[in-house]
Image (cartoon, rainbow, N blue to C red):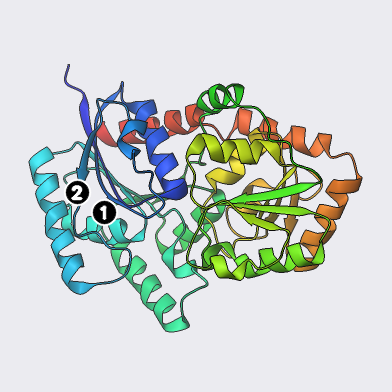
Amino acid sequence: MRKKKLLHIVEAMGGGVFTYIVELSNQLVEKYDIYIAYATRPQTPENFRDYFDDRIKLIEVENFSRSVNILSDVKAFFEIKNIVKKINPDVVHLHSSKAGALGRWCINGRKIPMFYTPHGFSFLMADQNKLKLKIYKAIEKVCSFRKCTTIACSKGEYNEAIKLNKRATYVNNGINKYELDITLRSISKNEIKGFTVFTLGRICYQKNPELFNKIAQSLPDVKFLWIGDGELRNKLTSPNIEVTGWVDRKTALIYAFSANAFMLTSLWEGLPISLLEAMYMKKLCIVSNVIGNRDVIKTLCNGFCCDTENDFIDAINFAKDKDCNELISNARNEVLSKYNTEVMAKKYNEIYQNALE
């Protein structure tokens, strides 16, 4: 019997979204004939094709751009339309705001079951002015009238989705614990002197490097490590911060595995893969109180969810001086039971199958 064709359309194939789409696609390749229409980002690995199962077909959308550009957006619209016509998919899944907007208008959701995962709504981005945020929210509201079901990647994102349209559900992001185990078994910890706090990702406004820097300045006896790079690297001026630049996955995991705690100072999130991996690696997690982070981390239960700079500082001092094994163990157990790719793929498959019936 012919496998059903599943088309993912992904404008932002970098960072956590890249990891997510790799894991979801590889998990479901036995059940579906999978196509991915994509655009890369600076943080997309150069050998990104090697991450995917050979049976997955990758199609580049040449005119996808992150920012609003009428000419390239119109071109991308027709590119997507042609890709859909050529593939004739049974299910379409759109990822991130740009693909979500263009896809919902160039694909007829009444003929093809269509789903949309925001991975962090654009109208929640704190780096945009109020007028832009109102425009982004208006675009989401207009697009929500199209026949398409939103699948949020966390409970917090779902709570935002149902304000726009009741046709929504959520599936928590998950990590591939088996792949992570294999990689972790093949590496050894770097010898780092002193208590070390790390983060991972692009050094951009969303990740709030200014707050990261202030916390580091307040704790000169703690070593801080930013695994990644980005346009706001110059904001990390404290002498106890090391920036690795972009490194391959194995090298990133060596750095992470060698640290004591994970810190995320983000202004907004979907549900960060880096956080879930840190939980699984038994790193104490200290995160900002925003959607995604607060859906997972509960203070003094499985980590620390912080509102202020002082909250972060107090949490790091607590981690240095107290036994946090129970919090760390609780966090890892949540990944084992809820936040892994097996659970995630099973739930997505159920949603797709229900739509195909």
View extreme (top): residue: 1
Q: Is residue 343 left or right of residue 144?
A: right
Q: Quadrant of residue 288?
A: bottom right
According to the picture, the residue beneath numbered tag 2 turns out to be 110
* Cα separation between marks 1 and 2: 6 Å
The label on residue 16 is none
* Residue 248 in sight: yes
**Tag 1 residue:** 147
Q: Residues within 10 Å of mark 1 (few under 14, many from 20)?
A: some
Q: Amino acid at mark 2?
A: Arg
Q: Residue at x 16, y 21 (%)?
A: 2
> Left or right: 7 with respect to 320?
left
The tally of labels here is 2
Question: Does residue 301 appear left or right of residue 25 in this picture?
Answer: right
Q: Are marks 1 and 2 in contact (CB under 8 Å)?
A: yes
Q: How many neighbours does mark 2 have within 10 angstroms: few (below 14), some (14-19), or many (20 or more)?
A: few
> Residue 243 at x, y = what percent?
60, 55
Q: Secondary structure at mark 1?
A: loop
Q: Nearer the viewer, residue 256 or 130?
A: 256
Residue depicted at x 40% and y 71%:
137
> Which quarter shows the N terminus?
top left
Q: Tag 2 or tag 1, which sits nearer the N-term?
A: 2
Q: Is residue 75 left or right of residue 286?
A: left
Dot 2 falls on a residue whose secondary structure is loop
